[in-house]
Image (tube, helix red, strand yellow):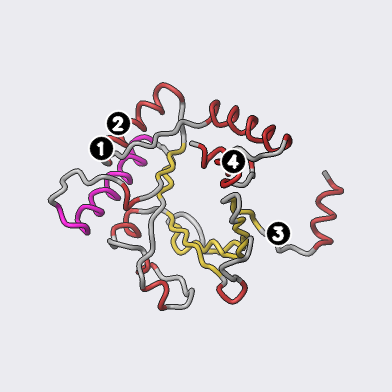
Amino acid sequence: SQLMVSIRAGVSRSRHTKGALNAGELENVQAARAELSRGWKLSDRPMTVEQIGSLARKWQRKDGVKVILIDHLQRIKRTDSRQDEVPALGHITWALAELARSTGLVIILGAQLNREAEKDRGVVQQRHLKGSGSIEEDSAMVIQIKVDESACAPNDVEWTMDLVKTKDRYGSLSRCPVRFLKSTGRIVEIDTRPAVVRQFEKSAV
């Protein structure tokens, strides 16, 4: 999709949509399209978790796909439209966990936070995951985004955030400071190590 190309190329999404890129940006876009066509497979159609599983297995078998990214949980179609939200989401997270276990695929699943996250002033809690406790229960790892509201204004061109690992079945909890570049949609890691360490590593390469 155009959004993925813009993010990968590091160009403004709005100017990309309007066709207002300069020569250097167009070159980056072409390189991003070529890279995504080789290593990525995209689908924009709404699907149930069973349809996602079928497509994922097909991509793995035919194209060697190793990672599936789903954006996002609350947009996955319910298998039974009459089912209430909580059991429906529980079925989806369980099915995706089973898909990962049975195929060895890495599945990255985006999910929204509920309104309690706003009331807690940026303190990250598992209960902030919207809709169902099964999200945390069925996940091997949970990473939440914490925005530093004191350092971010609505009109800022970039925001400072933390990626906070609140669950890791196979490792320890941690956090990683990042910058969100609003014009391109990219998230860039902030290197918090002393400059002398970075310079030493650079000269040692």
Tell me which amino acid carries mark 3.
Answer: Asp
Extent of the magenta region: 83-103
Q: In which quadrant of the rendered image does the C terminus lie?
A: top right
**Residue 122 shown left or right of residue 35 in the figure:** left
What secondary structure is found at the residue carrying circle 4?
A: helix
Question: Do tag 2 and tag 1 residues touch (Cβ < 8 Å)?
Answer: yes
Percent x, y of residue 188? 63, 54
Q: Which mark is residue 54?
A: 2
Q: Which mark is residue 191?
A: 3
Percent x, y of residue 34? 60, 27
Crowding near the residue tagged with mark 2, few <14, some 14–19, many ≥20 C-alpha atoms within 10 Å = few
Tell me which amino acid carries mark 1.
Answer: Glu
Residue placed under numbered mark 1 in the picture: 50
Q: Residue furthest right?
A: 203
Q: Is residue 63 above or below residue 173?
A: above
Percent x, y of residue 102? 33, 37
